[in-house]
Image (cartoon, rainbow, N blue to C red):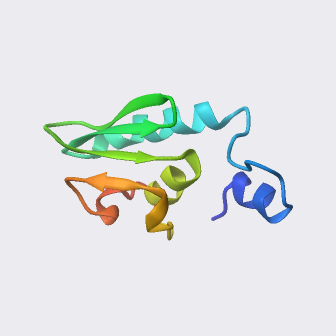
Amino acid sequence: MGHSGDIREALGIVDPYAAPSHELGVGLLAERSRRKEFSLDVQLGDRTARFGTGPLVGSLATDVETFVRLTGGRSADPGRFELEGVEPGDLVLFG
């Protein structure tokens, strides 16, 4: 399954994951993350969100594109995120 940002990226659009609806997508991911039995503080640029429920075990600092990739179980450039307390596979919500 692709993401609309992937299509915009393939077309060469600058900042393809910064579509007006990306806030809705991030909100959906935060909502779905309630299925997790741990939580992370997630820093997405100037926005902070809580991922998961349960005890706080770490943090993630990244951009929206990489956050979408990680939660979708897709490959993500390790240079584009800092993750502490869990492994990337622990973030998968869809995949």
Please, is residue 4 above or below residue 77 in the view? above
Q: Residue at x 38, y 59 (%)?
A: 92
- Is residue 72 in view from this perspective? no
Q: Residue at x 45, y 59 (%)?
A: 70
Q: How far from the left and from the top, in percent, is residue 22? A: 64, 37
The part of the image, by quadrant, that contains residue 64 is top right
- Is residue 71 in view from this perspective? yes
Q: Residue at x 80, y 65 (%)?
A: 10
Q: How far from the left and from the top, in percent, is residue 46? A: 50, 29
Q: Residue at x 79, y 50 (%)?
A: 14
15 and 30: which is toward the camera: 15
Outermost residue to the bottom: 75
Outermost residue to the front: 79
74 and 12: which is toward the camera: 12
Please, is residue 72 above or below residue 62 in the view? below
The part of the image, by quadrant, that contains residue 43 is top left
The part of the image, by quadrant, that contains residue 40 is top left
Locate residue 46 relative to residue 23 in the image: left or right: left
91 and 61: which is toward the camera: 61
Locate residue 6 relative to residue 90 in the image: left or right: right
Locate residue 45 relative to residue 52 in the image: left or right: right
Q: How far from the left and from the top, in percent, is residue 81? A: 43, 55
Q: How far from the left and from the top, in percent, is residue 29? A: 46, 41
26 and 43: which is toward the camera: 43
Task: Give the quadrant of the N terminus.
Answer: bottom right
